[in-house]
């Protein structure tokens, strides 16, 4: 027992300092996408055709939908898209996930003042895995470890929807999980919010347009925060949540 205590004292404080200090991510991390200043239409069309999940379009100028993007390297191979190490991908409006050359980088915005006064210091989520592969769930669980300590911000996941302030959705919402999702939503007392975590919950991910799924939760329930990624990095999840409750403002 004494050896364990000494070892723990030597370890010191292990929780990351974010948001007081920037998070350090490896160069291979694929974060916010970038484009060249000018893109030829023929090159954009070829890049769009290279995307296996329809995240890139070129009908009204080149655009990348981070809500559908799985951050695979297929488009980067053509040299038109590069991924920075900027983990700030979450947004409060679905259209803000569309990235265009030279366009504004939209960040998640805080809840309305009345909601923030209620939930800003104590926000509890009930998670529903609506057909997910458990990758988004795993990266969400990382936030409750000692390295991230999500609880220090007053944010926790609870077992009962009766004790929750919001619904945390992962997966493309399969037909088999649709009723369970709606029942959980109904059981959460108002006022309540919805977070769509991962490409599947936002737009169906690789299961988009399957007759067995509903292409995410946005067509079923009102979503307050979209967190892109497949799966989202814990830093992306944390950044979105802290912006939602007003703990991070600006850039």
Image: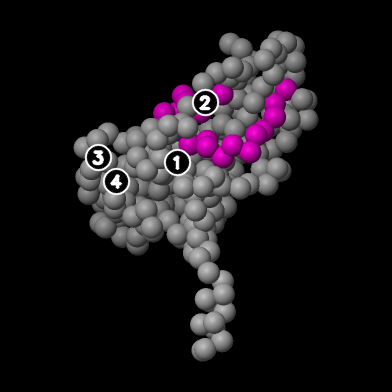
Q: Earlier in the sequence, mark 1 or mark 4?
A: 4
**Residue bearing mark 3:** 115
Q: Is 190 placed above or below 96 here?
A: below
Q: Is 57 placed above or below 157 here?
A: above
Question: Which secondary structure type mostly characterizes the magenta part of the structure?
Answer: loop
Q: Earlier in the sequence, mark 1 or mark 2?
A: 2
Q: Quadrant of residue 86?
A: top right
Question: Is label 3 in contact with label 1 (beta carbons under 8 Å)?
Answer: no
Question: Dot 1 lies on which element?
Answer: helix
Query: Does residue 30 appear to the left or right of 151 in the view shown?
Result: right
Residue neighbourhood size for the residue with mark 3, other residues' Cα within 10 Å, grouped as few (<14), some (14–19), many (≥20): some
Question: Dot 4 lies on which element?
Answer: loop
Q: Nearer the viewer, mark 4 or mark 3?
A: 4
Q: Quadrant of residue 10?
A: bottom right
Q: Position of residue 52 (x, y in %)?
A: 69, 31
Which residue is found at the position 56% from the left and 24% from the top?
Answer: 99
Q: Earlier in the sequence, mark 4 or mark 3?
A: 3
**Badge number at residue 240:** 1
Q: Position of residue 51 (x, y in %)?
A: 69, 28
């Amino acid at each position: 027992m004494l050896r364990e205590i000494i070892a723990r004292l030597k370890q010191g404080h292990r929780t990351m300092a974010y948001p007081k200090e920037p998070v350090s991510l490896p160069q291979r991390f694929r974060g916010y996408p970038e484009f060249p200043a000018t893109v030829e239409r023929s090159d954009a069309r070829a890049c769009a055709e290279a995307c296996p999940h329809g995240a890139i379009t070129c009908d009204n100028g080149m655009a990348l939908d981070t809500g559908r993007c799985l951050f695979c390297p297929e488009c980067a191979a053509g040299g038109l898209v590069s991924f920075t190490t900027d983990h700030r991908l979450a947004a409060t409006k679905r259209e803000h996930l569309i990235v265009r050359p030279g366009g504004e980088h939209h960040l998640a915005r805080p809840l309305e003042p009345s909601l923030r006064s209620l939930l800003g210091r104590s926000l509890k989520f009930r998670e529903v895995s609506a057909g997910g592969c458990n990758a988004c769930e795993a990266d969400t669980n990382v936030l409750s470890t000692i390295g991230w300590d999500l609880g220090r911000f007053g944010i926790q996941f609870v077992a009962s929807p009766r004790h929750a302030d919001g619904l945390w959705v992962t997966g493309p919402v399969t037909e088999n999980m649709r009723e369970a999702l709606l029942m959980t939503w109904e059981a959460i007392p108002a006022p309540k919010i919805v977070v769509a975590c991962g490409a599947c919950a936002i737009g169906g991910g690789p299961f988009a347009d399957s007759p067995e799924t509903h292409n995410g939760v946005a067509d079923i329930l009102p979503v307050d925060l979209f967190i892109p990624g497949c799966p989202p990095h814990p830093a992306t999840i944390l950044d979105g949540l802290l912006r939602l409750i007003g703990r991070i403002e600006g850039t």
